[in-house]
């Protein structure tokens, strides 16, 4: 009987487990969190460029040592394959982008006038435009 109760409790726990691991929605990021994420992305991109630069330098050193050793041993080598030079990414520098306001928020459009009267009137077209049509 104890074995049956233990198995029943285990099955109930296993059935409730997926609900415990349900994914909660992500909170809305604050402007500070967005800025931090943008800086982290820029730092990661710079780090990748730096890694590429260091790999290029290491490959150049290895190729130079190989060619020197092969020449010293008297082997004939073909002309080296031309490759672009290694480009140094420089030190990390991040400039936060300035916030660009949408046109509506920037005040670029004309301000709305206060509605003092309805847009339509009871005047006829003849009263509004007294000149006769030709």
Image: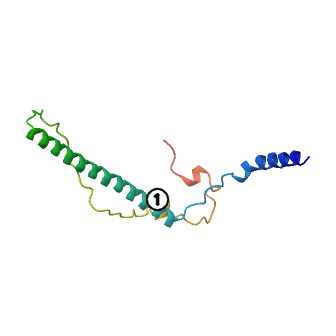
> On the image, which quarter does residue 108 sit in?
bottom left
83 sits to left or right of 130: left
112 sits to left or right of 50: right
- For this rendering, which residue is in front, 66 or 18? 66
Identify residue for label 1.
Answer: 103
- Toward the right, the furthest residue is 1
How was this image coloured?
rainbow
Please report the residue visible at 26 percent of the width from the left and 59 percent of the height from the top. Answer: 90
Please report the residue visible at 36 percent of the width from the left and 64 percent of the height from the top. Answer: 95
Q: Position of residue 98 (x, y in %)?
A: 40, 64
- Up/down of 98 relative to 72, above or below: below
- For this rendering, which residue is in front, 39 or 102? 39
Neighbour class for label 1 at 10 Å: few (<14), some, many (≥20)? Answer: few
> On the image, which quarter does residue 7 sit in?
top right
Please report the residue visible at 49 percent of the width from the left and 67 percent of the height from the top. Answer: 32
96 sits to left or right of 52: right
**Total count of labels:** 1
> On the image, which quarter does residue 83 sit in?
top left
- For this rendering, which residue is in front, 132 or 67? 67
Q: Where is residue 33 in the image (x, y as percent from the top left)?
A: 51, 64
Under tag 1, what secondary structure?
Answer: helix
Please report the residue visible at 30 percent of the width from the left and 49 percent of the height from the top. Answer: 52
65 sits to left or right of 35: left
């Amino acid at each position: 009987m104890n074995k049956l109760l233990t198995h029943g409790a285990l099955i109930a726990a296993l059935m409730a487990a997926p609900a415990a691991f349900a994914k909660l929605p992500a909170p809305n990021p604050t402007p500070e969190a967005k800025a931090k994420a943008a800086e982290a992305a820029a730092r990661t991109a710079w780090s990748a460029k730096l890694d590429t630069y260091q790999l290029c330098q290491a490959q150049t050193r290895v190729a130079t040592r190989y060619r020197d050793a092969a020449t010293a041993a008297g082997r004939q080598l073909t002309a080296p394959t031309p490759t672009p030079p290694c480009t140094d990414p420089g030190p990390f520098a991040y400039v936060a982008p300035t916030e660009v306001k949408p046109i509506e928020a920037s005040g670029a459009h004309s301000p709305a006038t206060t509605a003092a009267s309805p847009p339509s009137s009871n005047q006829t077209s003849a009263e509004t435009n007294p000149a006769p049509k030709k």
